[in-house]
Image (cartoon, rainbow, N blue to C red):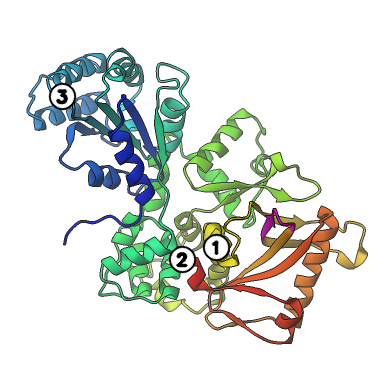
Amino acid sequence: MEQIIIGRQEEIGRLNKYVQSDQAEFVAIYGRRRVGKTYLVNHVFKGRFAFSMTGIIGGKKGAQLQAFVDAMDLYGNPIAIPDNWQEAFRLLRHFLTNHLKKDSPCIVFIDELPCLDTRKSGFVEALGHFWNSWASLQPQMMLIVCGSATSWMMENVIDAHGGLHNRITHEIHLKEFTLREEEEYLAYRGFHWDRDMVLQAYMVMGGIPYYLSLLDTDLSLAQNIDKLYFDPDGEMYREFDRLYRTLFSTIEPYIAIIRKLFNKKKGLTRTEIAQSLDIDANGRLTKMLRNLVDCDLVRFYPVKEKKLSARNGLYQLVDFFSLFYLQFMQGVNNDNQYWTKNLHTPKISTWRGLSFEKVCMTHIRQIKHALGIDGISTTFYSWRATDVEGQNRNKGNAQIDIVIDRADRMTNICEAKYSELPYAIDKEEFDKFMNRMMRFKQSTNHRGGLIPTFITSAGLQRNSYSEHLGVKVIGLDDLFK
């Protein structure tokens, strides 16, 4: 089958623009494990590399230097193994000097860059010297570095304070597929699934291309989930530890945060996380939270709540695979048909509803398009109220999934509802929604208009309650645009 690339048009355009530059370019590409960073670079520059190599995950300094030697050999320059990275980059500089051509780009690709920075290896310093002393002075040079350990990439390359400080000329944060891109990818692979099945696959795997590539066209979605996730020999059975060990050198404190966030679906503030873990809300916690956000596992979002300033918003676990693993895979017995047997249980139904909310959060651009407000400046956030706020009749908690504040002084109050049949608003739901809107106006001192908006997977059943609310409906097809 001919290899193609789905989506990524913006990133492809940027890379092609950079390679045509008349100056040296140092491009850092980062993103979650298995999101397709290597595939993107190889697709754009296949057959055009002057040199490329890949770090060995878990390898020590000797193994990494041997990987460098093996790569040099593949490019027709056999060498003895160097003593250190300074010597390795000196050899690379000599090799590339003989291949520089005035009107042709010299493309160097170093993949899994964080793996090369083993303890006391001096790799980062040597890379910085290579770029600063020679490569940056060659207008033909295009150095591309990739890494799944996003926190390492941010600290040591993109936001570095040493020799690589402000040396990156461009950075690309490669994110997961949208629903539309996932649908295109599955169609390319030969799947003939309706959009509800594509949506449910997204809830399990997110838009991670490698995870989607594991699906078998001969099996149903439920059978695929059993085979990949619940069979001890399945490719996803041990992915949780692999994912976090790839991203972080010490995973225990990160997983502790992830588990706390999993148990609080709407998220926790930094202070609440510290209290729940019985640790100090200090710089170390701030750094770990920032790393989790940079790795696309957690999102930080503002919350309109009287007790919270915009700076102290909520951290929420949004990685679909982590959510699925913590909900269903940890502690599950050895039933390799768990998913097929439990498809219609309340536990899975509840999970679908919560996951659909997060799908909607990752498709705000599509929601804005469906609302016809692409050209209007907006901010979006979640809202919650946890106190009485002076109104006895409003006692209890209240929350709104998505609030879209618009520059035209209108605000969409959005509820995300997953259902297999058109969703019907009953009296209880109507009363709750009216109460939420009233409390929202009171607690935020809102001025302007409110537009009740329902984002549904199977449409909305029109009845007296929906008519009275004047609901704006966003359907599943809208999320695929």
Label 1 crowd bin: few (<14), some (14–19), many (20+), radius 10 Å = some
Q: Quadrant of residue 156?
A: top left
The residue wearing badge 2 is 481
Q: Does the rendering let one see residue 2?
A: yes
The residue wearing badge 3 is 101
Outermost residue on the bottom side: it is 463
Label 1, label 3: how far apart the Cα atoms are: 47 Å
What amino acid does circle 1 point to? His
Question: SS at mark 3?
Answer: loop
Q: Which residue occupies the foreground of this view, 22 or 480?
A: 22
Q: Which residue occupies the foreground of this view, 64 or 415?
A: 415
Label 3 crowd bin: few (<14), some (14–19), many (20+), radius 10 Å = few
Q: Is 403 inside the magenta-drawn segment? A: yes
Of mark 2 and mark 3, the one earlier in the sequence is 3
Residues under numbered marks 2 and 3 in contact, where contact means CB atoms less than 8 Å apart = no
The label number, if any, that marks residue 369 in the structure image = 1
What amino acid does circle 3 point to? Lys
What amino acid does circle 2 point to? Lys
The magenta segment: 402-409
Q: Which residue occupies the foreground of this view, 368 or 397?
A: 368
What residue is shown at x 27% (from left), y 66% (from top)? Answer: 188
